[in-house]
């Protein structure tokens, strides 16, 4: 067997067996702590999410956002009482992977290509 075909076959065989775990529906509601690192700085917030609203506390400030799930792993956040132009922009969040108590996500403002990543840990599990 030609080495190239063997390498390609091996790659396909092993990559098809590995699937990233995404039990996104486990994280639609609950109490969470989110950690996002931008550059050298780490940002931590806590939030409570139910089926229609998320209430988040970040740096001693509390904000509320309505939520609309696109599918089990993607959600749109809309700030309820925006106080600036930036807060008027909706945020798109996508859950990339899950564990038994956390999920890794990426998010961006709707329509923008710059994405940030973070981890959310479920506190009430």
Image (cartoon, rainbow, N blue to C red):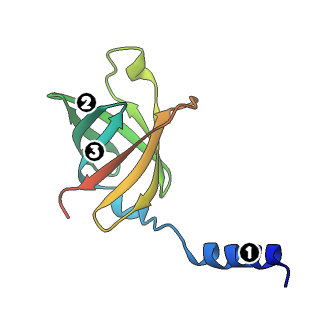
**Of marks 2 and 1, the one in the foreground:** 1
Asked if residue 9 is positioned above or below residue 35 in the image, the reply reads below
SS category of the residue bearing label 1: helix
In percent of width and height, residue 34 lies at: 28, 44
Q: Residues within 10 Å of mark 1 (few under 14, many from 20)?
A: few
Badges 1 and 3: C-beta atoms under 8 Å apart? no
Q: Residue furthest right?
A: 2
Q: CA distance from mark 2 to mark 1?
A: 52 Å
The Cα atoms of the two marked residues, 1 and 3, are separated by 40 Å
Measuring from the top left, give residue 124's x and y in whole percent: 17, 60
Q: Earlier in the sequence, mark 2 or mark 1?
A: 1
Mark 3 crowdedness (10 Å alpha carbons): few <14, some 14-19, many ≥20: many
Is the residue marked by circle 2 packed among few (<14), some (14-19), or many (20+) residues within 10 Å?
some
Q: Earlier in the sequence, mark 1 or mark 3?
A: 1
Q: Is residue 92 visible?
A: no
Q: Is residue 70 left or right of residue 54?
A: right
> Residue 1: x, y in percent?
84, 85
On the image, numbered disc 3 is attached to which residue?
Answer: 34
Q: Which mark is residue 63?
A: 2
Report which residue position mark 1 lands on. Answer: 7
Query: Residue at the spot x=31%, y=23% of the render?
Result: 81
Q: For this rendering, which residue is in front, 42 or 22?
A: 42
- The CA span between labels 2 and 3 is 14 Å
Q: Residue at x 34, y 51 (%)?
A: 51
Q: Secondary structure at mark 3?
A: strand
């Amino acid at each position: 067997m030609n080495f190239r075909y063997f390498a390609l076959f091996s790659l396909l065989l092993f990559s098809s067996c590995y699937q990233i775990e995404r039990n996104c529906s486990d994280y639609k509601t609950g109490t969470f702590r989110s950690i996002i690192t931008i550059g050298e700085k780490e940002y931590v917030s806590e939030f409570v999410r139910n089926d229609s609203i998320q209430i988040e506390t970040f740096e001693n400030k509390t904000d509320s956002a309505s939520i609309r799930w696109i599918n089990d792993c993607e959600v749109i956040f809309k700030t309820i009482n925006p106080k600036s132009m930036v807060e008027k922009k909706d945020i798109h969040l996508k859950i990339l992977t899950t564990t038994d108590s956390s999920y890794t996500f990426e998010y961006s403002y709707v329509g923008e290509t710059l994405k940030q990543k973070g981890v959310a840990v479920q506190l009430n599990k």
